[in-house]
Image: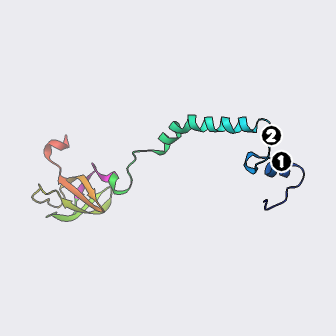
Amino acid sequence: MRYFRCRDGWARQLCCSGWWSGSVCLPGQRLHFLLWVIKDIALYPIVRSAYESDAKTGVEQLVGEKGMAQERLDPQGMVRIRGELWQAAAEPTEQSIEPNCEVKVTAATGLTLTVSKKSVSQKA
């Protein structure tokens, strides 16, 4: 059962003679559909790789960044990274981190960064 009535001309050709309507296909219509499917299968690996990226988003971008402790981290406090203040916790192996000490972000859990004191050997 059709929900609308096709008129003569291009509308009739578009809505009444396609492979989806159960009518006889126009010459070349099946070939066109087959070529379209082959093209999609051939381009799938290229298109898929364009959408799959290892780009880090949000707080994950900050892992590996350097910053400055704004207050004593014993074990938690605030650090400034890229000009923004972040809640941070010192790594469990760290004693405490003094204010104005350079730190490096080692991990992120939620919106809390885990930082370690940047040692003298890391500055070079």
* Mark linked to residue 86: none
Regarding residue 27, the answer to whether it shows in the image is: yes
Q: Is residue 59 above or below residue 17?
A: below
Q: Is residue 103 above or below residue 25?
A: below
* Mark linked to residue 13: 1
Q: Nearer the viewer, residue 50 or 42?
A: 42
Residue 64 counted in the magenta span: yes
Task: Give the residue pinned by disc 2.
Answer: 26
Q: Amino acid at mark 1?
A: Gln
Q: Position of residue 82 (x, y in %)?
A: 32, 55
Residue 2 falls left or right of residue 54: right
Residue 65 falls left or right of residue 44: left
Residue 65 falls left or right of residue 74: right
Classify 10 Å Cα crowding around label 1: few (below 14), some (14-19), many (20 and above): few
Q: Position of residue 30 (x, y in %)?
A: 72, 38
Q: Amino acid at mark 2?
A: Leu
Residue 72 figure quarter: bottom left
Q: Nearer the viewer, residue 89 or 101?
A: 89
Classify 10 Å Cα crowding around label 2: few (below 14), some (14-19), many (20 and above): few
The Cα atoms of the two marked residues, 2 and 1, are separated by 9 Å
Regarding residue 71, the answer to whether it shows in the image is: no
Identify the residue at horizontal 9%, vertical 58% (top origin): 95
| Quadrant of the snapshot with the C terminus | top left
Identify the residue at horizontal 63%, vertical 38% (top origin): 37
Q: Position of residue 89 (x, y in %)?
A: 20, 61
Residue 16 counted in the magenta span: no
Q: Position of residue 97 (x, y in %)?
A: 14, 59
First to last magenta residue range: 61-68
